[in-house]
Image: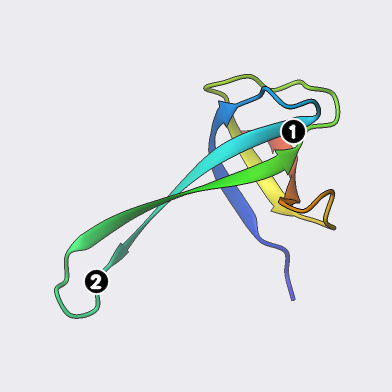
Amino acid sequence: MPKKILSGIVVSDKPNKTITVLVERKYQHPILKKIIRVRKKYNAHDENNKFKNGDKVSIIESKPFSKNKKFQVMEESK
Protein backbone atom coordinates (compact mmCIF):
# COMPACT_ATOMS: atom_id res chain seq x y z
CA MET A 1 0.00 0.00 0.00
CA PRO A 2 1.43 3.43 -0.90
CA LYS A 3 2.30 5.91 1.84
CA LYS A 4 0.09 8.95 2.33
CA ILE A 5 1.57 12.25 1.22
CA LEU A 6 -0.17 15.35 2.57
CA SER A 7 0.59 19.04 2.22
CA GLY A 8 -0.28 21.78 4.65
CA ILE A 9 0.88 24.75 6.68
CA VAL A 10 3.00 24.62 9.85
CA VAL A 11 0.94 25.99 12.75
CA SER A 12 3.29 25.08 15.64
CA ASP A 13 7.01 24.41 15.97
CA LYS A 14 7.38 24.54 19.75
CA PRO A 15 8.20 20.91 20.61
CA ASN A 16 11.76 19.79 19.88
CA LYS A 17 12.07 17.96 16.50
CA THR A 18 8.29 18.16 15.97
CA ILE A 19 6.00 20.41 13.96
CA THR A 20 2.22 20.52 13.78
CA VAL A 21 0.84 20.73 10.25
CA LEU A 22 -2.69 21.87 9.41
CA VAL A 23 -3.97 19.92 6.39
CA GLU A 24 -7.14 21.10 4.67
CA ARG A 25 -9.20 19.02 2.27
CA LYS A 26 -12.41 19.77 0.42
CA TYR A 27 -15.08 17.33 -0.67
CA GLN A 28 -18.64 17.45 -1.93
CA HIS A 29 -21.43 16.17 0.28
CA PRO A 30 -22.99 13.17 -1.49
CA ILE A 31 -26.62 14.24 -1.06
CA LEU A 32 -26.59 17.99 -0.42
CA LYS A 33 -23.84 18.66 -3.03
CA LYS A 34 -22.38 21.35 -0.78
CA ILE A 35 -18.58 21.76 -0.77
CA ILE A 36 -17.33 20.97 2.74
CA ARG A 37 -13.91 22.06 4.02
CA VAL A 38 -12.32 19.82 6.65
CA ARG A 39 -9.16 20.72 8.58
CA LYS A 40 -7.02 18.29 10.51
CA LYS A 41 -3.76 18.69 12.41
CA TYR A 42 -0.92 16.18 12.14
CA ASN A 43 2.27 16.00 14.18
CA ALA A 44 5.31 15.46 11.98
CA HIS A 45 8.96 14.71 12.71
CA ASP A 46 11.36 17.55 11.82
CA GLU A 47 14.88 16.25 12.56
CA ASN A 48 16.76 19.57 12.29
CA ASN A 49 14.08 21.97 13.60
CA LYS A 50 14.26 23.58 10.16
CA PHE A 51 10.62 24.61 9.62
CA LYS A 52 8.86 27.56 11.26
CA ASN A 53 5.25 28.75 11.58
CA GLY A 54 3.62 29.62 8.26
CA ASP A 55 5.86 27.38 6.08
CA LYS A 56 4.12 25.20 3.50
CA VAL A 57 5.38 21.63 3.80
CA SER A 58 4.72 18.14 2.47
CA ILE A 59 4.60 15.29 4.97
CA ILE A 60 4.78 11.56 4.33
CA GLU A 61 3.51 8.65 6.39
CA SER A 62 6.29 6.76 8.19
CA LYS A 63 7.02 4.53 11.12
CA PRO A 64 5.68 5.84 14.44
CA PHE A 65 8.11 8.22 16.16
CA SER A 66 5.87 8.52 19.22
CA LYS A 67 2.24 8.02 20.30
CA ASN A 68 0.88 10.77 18.05
CA LYS A 69 3.73 11.32 15.57
CA LYS A 70 3.36 9.06 12.52
CA PHE A 71 4.48 11.44 9.75
CA GLN A 72 7.77 13.04 8.84
CA VAL A 73 8.55 16.14 6.80
CA MET A 74 9.40 15.36 3.21
CA GLU A 75 10.15 18.82 1.78
CA GLU A 76 9.09 22.43 1.75
CA SER A 77 6.29 23.11 -0.73
CA LYS A 78 6.35 26.14 -2.97
Q: Earlier in the sequence, mark 1 or mark 2?
A: 1
Name of the residue lying farthest toward the bottom = 31
Q: Residue drawn at (67%, 32%), measured in percent from left and top?
A: 19
Question: In this view, which residue lies farthest toward the left?
Answer: 32
Which element type, helix, strand or loop, lies under badge 1?
strand
Q: Is residue 8 rendered to the left or right of residue 26?
A: right
Q: Quadrant of the C terminus?
A: top right
Query: Does 44 appear above or below 18?
Result: below
Query: Label 1 is placed on what type of residue?
Result: Thr
Distance of label 1 from label 2 (alpha carbons): 34 Å
Residue highlighted by disc 2: 29
Q: Nearer the viewer, residue 38 or 6?
A: 38
The residue at 18%/80% (across/down) is 31
The dot on residue 43 is none
Would you place residue 47 above or below residue 37 in this image? above
Residue assigned mark 1? 18
Which amino acid type is marked by label 2? Answer: His
Mark 1 vs mark 2: in front: 1
